[in-house]
Image (cartoon, rainbow, N blue to C red):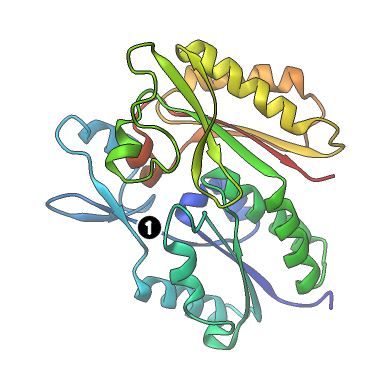
Amino acid sequence: MADEKIAILVDSCCDVPKDYRDKYKMYVVPLTIIYKDAEYRDGIDIQPEDVFARFSTEIPSTSLPSPSTVRDVFKRIKADGYEKVVVVTISSGLSGTYELIRGFGPAPEGLETHYIDTKNIGIGSGFSAIRAGELIEKGLPFDDVCRQVEEAALHTTLLFCVSTLEYLMKGGRIGLVSGMLGTMLDLKPVISCNKDGIYYTVAKARGRKKSLALALEKAVEFEAGAKEYNITVMHGAAKEEADELLAALKARLPDYRIAIEGQITPALVVHTGPGLIGIGIQRLS
């Protein structure tokens, strides 16, 4: 049915840029950032620069959205006249957010709801939400939207490099990446999510410059043969490097549909620290 009223709900760590959130009227459930003296809603009460500025005195922790926040978002979606919801979240292998939201059942507030565990992180998840917006805008039926977004999630990868593994280790998000990886040899891992949505080492190179170049190569390899694709370079206080890498990615893959660059959300900053670079590809066909 082309007249179905379909909403999109994402968690804040899907890192969908504001212009796309606004364009597709996405509803966002924020994760929580916890300091000793206060708690903040990710991207609402606190911004990335605030987290960076306080790293010298405290590395905060993060927690799931509160159930009351999720409930209120579903109520708002219902009040706004929607009948169905596509929920897109970051990997259940990295966060309990998917299970928390799914726990509200198949029809919270009477809304027919489909839950998508992207097995990814950041804009690697956010690309699936953007895809949902495109399909809904085209008037596709709910079942088709859900099926195609599930498919898009399977064909999306995000490869990232961090300046240090300290923040991933402290946050318990190290996954299958060795925390002792090449400290003496300055070996830097290129990290991604495996099929279970858990961090693992894709490859490693000596020094940051070589690791970033390797991540770029791996991203280009992932695109191979795609007719339609989206690209992204996201960063954590590393805009100059991100600008250079996005230019290089565009030069290598000039036929992209969407190119996204930006600063990662505060909750992701907590777990990756300054200097993160993420290079992503979404294959659409």
| Residue 246 visible (yes or no) | no
Residue placed furthest toward the bottom: 110
Residue 87's quadrant in the figure? Answer: bottom right
For disc 1, the neighbor class at 10 Å (few under 14, some 14 to 19, many from 20) is many
Q: Residue at x 39, y 49 (%)?
A: 43
> Percent x, y for residue 282?
71, 41
Q: Quadrant of the N terminus?
A: bottom right
> Percent x, y for residue 36?
13, 50
SS class, disc 1: loop
When the figure is inspected, residue 100 is found, relative to residue 28, above or below; the finding is below
| Residue 214 visible (yes or no) | yes
Q: Quadrant of the C terminus?
A: top right
- The residue at which mark 1 appears reads as 31
Residue 106's quadrant in the figure? Answer: bottom right
- Please name whichever residue, 78 or 146, is drawn nearer the observer in this view of the structure: 146
When the figure is inspected, residue 57 is found, relative to residue 122, above or below; the finding is above
Q: Amino acid at mark 1?
A: Leu
- Please name whichever residue, 78 or 103, is drawn nearer the observer in this view of the structure: 103
Q: Residue at x 71, y 59 (%)?
A: 150
When the figure is inspected, residue 275 is found, relative to residue 268, above or below; the finding is above
When the figure is inspected, residue 266 is found, relative to residue 178, above or below; the finding is below
